[in-house]
Image (cartoon, rainbow, N blue to C red):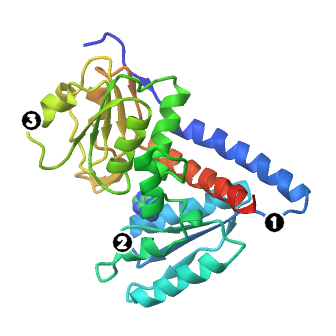
Amino acid sequence: MSSQTAQLLDGKALAQRIQEELAQQIQTLQAQNQRLPGLAVLMVGDNPASAAYVRNKERACQKVGIASFGRQFPTETTQAEVEQAIQALNQDDRVDGILVQLPLPDHLDSVALLNQIDPSKDVDGLHPVNMGRLVRGEPGLRSCTPAGVMRLLQEYQIDPKGKHAVVIGRSILVGKPQALLLLEADATVTIAHSKTQNLAAIASSADILIAAIGRPGLITADMVKPGATVIDVGINRITDYEGKSYLVGDVEFEAVRQVAEFITPVPGGIGPMTVAMLLSNTVQSYHQRRS
Ligand code: GUN
């Protein structure tokens, strides 16, 4: 065990800096009377966590000067209605980015809806064309959370090259694209998931450990190699015995910070980076669609 506690990877501060840079770029466009970048976040239903994420994204857009074209649909909205909304946004030249907030209510087919998004406006990087580009190592729009993890590692000069990176979680939103981005950065990558045997042994061989499962306290100190970098993507709301609610990650933060060299806090780690990457992807898409 190392004698010092881990250094915090401050996603909140970096996200703020990225947003300030984007705001400056957008101010320049404004001064030149150019059209401003636009983002549409679509949400269906009233999942409170999703509603909070969507509010965050819209607030961040407003702060940097990105125009919002978001829409909220009631839970009972049909597949055809959401498809029509996506088609309209695909045609709308003021809109550079379209994001369908997940998860969707059970009666909707999210894969079919994501497939409807124009790949040049797919700022979430979840369309098969952008996923395919990622698999092939070609430039394209990258999923926001995994891109945020890579940007934060870069900021602290943590180079994945040649390191063993273990990604716990295999979701389309985080685990899979995260593993591919780490591979692109020359890491040796292992993907673990809920059916993995000997998770502790695999996790504790990681130089870079990424937890993206959504289970509070999954990663304990004995699962972490001394000196490792621990990235906590989990955002779980828990309620204590007094009825107070908190956000926690997948990592037992206080114990693991005694073992790791670098660690992300929750909140203030990867969450804000996801939003910053979404805005950055929207501005990237804006420039690409104009060129
Ligand atoms: N739900 C939670 N995080 C995300 C995200 O980054 N994108 C989308 N589309 N849905 C989410």
Q: Label 3 to label 1, Cα distance in Å? A: 54 Å
- Determine the residue positioned at 64% across, 74% down: 69
Amino acid type at image mark 3: Asn
Left or right: residue 138 compared with residue 209: right
| Residue nearest the viewer, comparing 88 with 20 | 88
Categorize mark 3 by other alpha carbons within 10 Å: few (<14), some (14-19), many (20+).
Answer: few
Q: Which dot marks residue 93?
A: none
The percent coordinates of residue 51 (x first, y second) are 46, 68
**SS of the residue under disc 1:** loop
**Which corner quadrant of the image does residue 141 belong to?**
bottom right
- Determine the residue positioned at 59% across, 74% down: 70
Task: For marks 3 and 2, give the one nearer the viewer.
Answer: 2
Judge whether residue 268 can be spotted in this image.
no
Amino acid type at image mark 1: Arg
**Which corner quadrant of the image does residue 165 belong to?**
top left
Categorize mark 1 by other alpha carbons within 10 Å: few (<14), some (14-19), many (20+).
Answer: few
Residue beneath disc 1: 35
Left or right: residue 227 compared with residue 53: left
| Residue nearest the viewer, comparing 217 with 233 | 233
Residue beneath disc 3: 198
Amino acid type at image mark 2: Val
* Chain-order first, disc 1 or disc 2: 1
Q: Looking at the image, is 204 positioned above or below residue 278?
A: above
Residue beneath disc 2: 111
Left or right: residue 200 compared with residue 208: left
* Chain-order first, disc 3 or disc 2: 2
Q: Quadrant of ligand 1?
A: bottom left
Q: Quadrant of the C terminus?
A: bottom right
Q: Label 1 to label 2, Cα distance in Å? A: 31 Å
